[in-house]
Amino acid sequence: MFKENTILNMAKRVLRQFCDRGQSRFENGRLYLPRVYVKQLGTTHRVKLRVIQEAPKYIFELEEIEPSPYQIDKHDQRISFCCNICGSINTEVAMDIVSNREAASCGTCHSSLRMRSVINALSVELLGESIQLPAFPVSRNIRGIGLSDWEGYASRLKNKLSYINTFYHQVPRLDITNIPDDEIGKYDFVISSDVMEHVSYKDLGKAFTNMARLLKSGGFLLLTVPYKPDGDTDEYYPDLHDFKFITTKEKTFLYNRTVDGVEQIFNNLVFHGGGGFTLEMRMFSESGLLKVLADNGFAGGVRIYRDNDEKYGIAW
Ligand SMILES: [Zn+2]
């Protein structure tokens, strides 16, 4: 924003002089203004303004800037940050890498923005402030459970807390749609990072309810999913019932038979990092997420972490 204002003010100054000198002229009943070229930080921006008032003085507003200073900013900008997962210092990393949700932007542990954001939220919820994971106090009385968590922070959490990482397809196994009774009410926190978009529609409510059931009173769910800010959740396979994947040389298809016996075939499947377990079933929306949470055990309140913390490389 700052950069755009600077460019805009330079362009306005040039055009005001141009008009004051009487160099402007009318064309088809409109005041003709030339484009202004403003060079900033090595990039030349072509700026087009329009006049919204002529007397007592000229007032201009922006019509277009090419290239946009925002695009340039992202490529040019670099930040230095301390990784809140491994504690190492990363210097002068390109902002478009650091602000990419999934890019491995820490040179030491290869954490991404999403992973650092999980630890940031965990730290604030557990300890009341954001500190780096290596500085967490050892607290074996805090019990946590992860659903297919990233090993980069899972292994470090194990050294600090009574934390166990679980998997759908390998030991230690946990199927969140069917949890054992002796796990109920045992945990201070559950981490579910980019898992719920892979749970089939018919099991989704149960998965959320079970995450709530794993928690002690006062415990919390730390949830991430890809989601869009507006609209409703897009459910890609709402009638999934008896289904299998069919892989040909070129492509994988999803074959489904609905409860009513209707056959469906889907292509254009999106998998996150391999096999059948990671099929993307939906794109949540923010309101859709809040609703599924409220309807399934999390009516008590949701806090959405939107703030950046650039010292820890959290720059959305
Ligand atoms: Zn790191």
Image (cartoon, grey):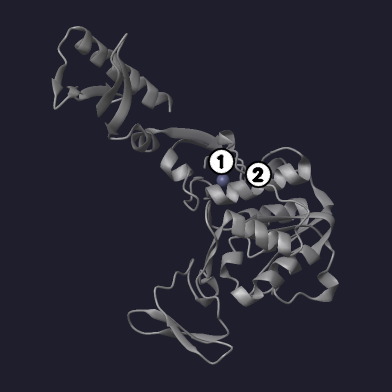
Q: Which residue is mark 1?
A: 314
Q: Give the x, y percent position of residue 88.
A: 57, 40
Q: Please say if the residues under marks 1 and 2 sit with CB atoms less than 8 Å apart.
A: yes
Question: Helix, strand, or loop for circle 1?
Answer: loop
- Residue 289, placed above or below residue 266: above
User: What residue sits right under mark 2 in the picture?
Assistant: 120
Q: Is residue 251 left or right of residue 45?
A: right
Q: Residue furthest bottom?
A: 261
Q: Quadrant of residue 124?
A: top right
Query: Dot 1: few (<14), some (14–19), or many (≥20) neighbours within 10 Å?
Result: many
Left or right relative to 265: residue 170: right
Three-letter amino acid code at the position of disc 2 = Asn
Q: Is residue 11 visible?
A: yes
Decide if ligand 1 comes within 8 Å of the CB at mark 1: no
Q: What residue is drawn where x is 41% and y is 33%?
A: 77
Cα–Cα span, label 1 and label 2: 8 Å
SS category of the residue bearing label 2? helix
Task: Say whether mark 2 is within 8 Å of ligand 1.
Answer: no
Q: Check disc 1 and give the amino acid type.
A: Ile
Residue 239: % across, % down = 55, 80
Number of residues whose C-alpha sits closer than 10 Å to that of mark 2, classed few (under 14), some (14–19) or many (20 or more): many
Residue, x 53% and y 85% (percent of image)?
243
- Closer to us: 241 or 94: 241
Disc sitting over residue 225 in the figure: none
